[in-house]
Every structure is written in C-alpha cells, then in structure tokens.
Amino acid sequence: MKPVYIASYRQSKFGKLLAMTVPEILEQSVLDACAEIDVPASAIDVGSVGAACNMTLNEQGLLSGLMAMVPGLEGKPIEAVENACASGGQAILSVIAKMQMGWGDTGIAVGYEKMRDAEGKMDGKLIGKALGYFSHPGEREGKIFVFPHVFAEVMRDYMSTHSVTEEDLASVAVQEYAAAKNNPYAQMQKVPLTLEQAMKIEGLNRYVVDGLPLKTYDCSQITDGYAAMILATEKGLRKLGVDKADCVEIAGYAQATDPLRKEGREVLRPKGAYCAMSKAYAMAGLSAKDINVAEVHDCFSVMGAIGAEVIGKAGYGKGARYWRDGKASADGECGINTSGGLIAKGHPIGATGISMVGWASWQLLGKAPKGAQVPNARAAATFNIGGPICATVCTVLKPAS
C-alpha cells in the first residue's frame, strides 16, 4: 500500500451558504483547496464528491459531472458517493482507493451540504423527512423527526445501561460550545452555553420527543457548508511541489457497515464501528494509547460519549464520564472535538467526515486556532458515522515522516 498524505485542506464557514448554488459550491471547494497550495485543478488526477441530500433538498444528481466542470478536471475519474452522514469520510476513502489502484497520484475529496434556502432559512419538516430516508422503513412509523427520535432512544438506553444522567451528557454539548468559540469556521462560535442552560427546559431548549431524554442542546446543527481535501502519494507530493514535512499522513483507514435496522443490534457497542476503528489502528501501527487528538461523530450528545469509547479512550460505558472528568478537553488526556464537534461546529452532512479529518490534520501540524490547539499533538483518530450508527468510516493520522 502506498502511503497517502494530506497535501491541502480548506473549508467554508459552517452555517449558511445563502445564495450559493450547488455548481458554485463544488467549484469553490476545488478552487479553495487548490489555492491553499497554489496548484491548478489540472494537477488533480482523481476525485470524489460526497453529499446526502443533493437529490431530496437540492434536486441535483450527477455531482461528479458538476465537479468535472471545473477547468482542468474534465475527463478525470470522478465519482459521487453517498453513505448518509459518513458521505464525507467515504469520499476520502474513494480517492485513496483510486490512488491505490494506480489511477493517479493526486486526488481531491469534496463534501458539501446545502440544507437552507438563499435567505438562510430552513424547512424543518422537509429536512426531517429527507433525513428520515436514511433509516429502515420499518423504524420510521410514528416518528415525526426520525433521527432525533432514534437517538433519543439510544440516549435513553445508554443512560439506563450505564447509570448515566442527562446532566452527564449535557456536559458534552457544553464543552463543545466552549470549544467552538475558538473555531472561526464553527456555526455556533458566538453562542455561549452553560450547563444550567443546557439542562433547563425553556425557550428553544425542549425535549424533542415526549418521554425521552433528548433535548435541543443535545442535538447537532442543521448546516450548510463545504470542505475539500487534496490527497497525494509521495510521487503526487512531488508533482504538487508540496514538502512531505508539511503534511499529515492518513496512516490508517477502514470502513464498515452494520445492518440498517437498529432493532436487534447492540447499538451501544456497534460492531462495525469497533471493527473499522480496530482495522484503522492496525493499519497505522498505532493504538488508542498513542492518540491525543480525536474528532468523533457527535450528531447527538450520546454519540460524543459512545465515540470516546469506540476510539478506545474510554472503556465501554465510561465515555460520558471521560467527558465529565475533563479528559476530552484540549489540555486533557485526548482533545476530542476541539473543533466544536457536530453539535457546535455544525453538521453539513456531506462535508462532516472531511472536516473531521481536516481539523485533526491542522492539530497535528500545529495549525489549530489559538485556544483550540492540543499541546504536543502526536497522533489523531476520527470516527465518522452514517444512519443509526450503521455506516462507519475511521481514520488514524500521524505527522508525515
């Protein structure tokens, strides 16, 4: 296997893309990543673009063809991928696979989501319906907003199984809002949140489903945004004129998929997620003990806790306590979601997996914003999921050597 490096990473500010059209978003994504290292798009050999709601919310298919409209990318091997909220991570793996097959030595992974209109407004019911398509048909009945309902059940089960409180899980969101203030790209950068606010049922903070513990502040954000990453082999780096010393290596990567139906699975200890993370560590020749930077897929606060367990920083059922004890802070044992996570950074579905890997690379290069930088960042793990903890993409990063 050829080593693969991150040569460039760029993203939009997460939140609202307003009047930007899908063709404009894809073009700008490519141009931004190329501008970061001052290369033309023609220097890119292969590509992949990930999005989840392009058909349902944007009425746009064949995203690869739109990407090929960027001058220099026409005629290149490009594909569109969809793996629910793991679409961004899947786009990265798609590019890596093309390079490992010898189709090229440089590639670009782009992810985006446009979930709001030109004025920045959102249609909550339409978005809820569109996202609900990523669940099993048999588990949608009676659920107005499918995924908040599904993860409210996961939250209930996690709390009862592990004797965890609502306050324990609310502390995940509070820490992420605090982290987001240091991230200029975060959607909720200027929104403060105290534990008292996160627990108090008033104003916009309410129980999402009657009888279940999930509250508004436990949820990730409906977000517009894009992210783009240029990957390269050693030969590709020379072609791009990028010094390997300025790069991060994606030293380990893996993907796994559990059955879509949540019922009947051990969702608190998802088999596919643990399998993918284990394979990524083995490929990188590292273990959880080597990791002190991580970005995990906290679409809801309970996933921040489960994510800490999947990456191996907390034992089974101990993830919430890991956060509550401050071990996930930037100056803790392992800086988890120092970007603000999906809860406060935002969750533009197709861009999310790419942004997780991109932020982790910034940490390892010492390029994270002031206040967010993990001291002596040495190795990173990312855990990106899609659906009801169904699709999983994991990566392990280390400084290039």
Image (cartoon, rainbow, N blue to C red):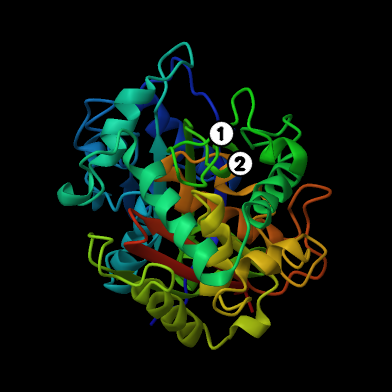
Q: In the image, is 314 to the left or to the right of 302?
A: right
Mark closest to the chain's N terminus, 1 or 2: 1
| Rendering coords of residue 16 (x, y %) | 52, 24
Q: Residues within 10 Å of mark 2 (few under 14, many from 20)?
A: many
Above or below — where is 205 with respect to 350?
A: above
- Residue at point 24%, 38% (across, down): 142
Residue 2 in the image: x percent, y percent? 41, 79
Q: Is residue 30 visible?
A: yes
Residue furthest toward the front? Answer: 211
Mark 1 secondary-structure assignment:
loop
Q: Which residue is mark 1?
A: 14
Helix, strand, or loop for circle 2? helix
The disc label shown at residue 276, or none: none
Q: Residue at x 19, y 37 (%)?
A: 62
Q: Is residue 316 above or below residue 107?
A: below
Q: How many marks?
A: 2
Residue 229 seen from this side: no
User: Viewed as shown, does residue 335 lie left or right of 383?
Assistant: right
Which residue is identified by label 2? 345
Going by the numbered disc 1, the residue's amino acid type is Phe
Q: Amino acid at mark 2?
A: Lys
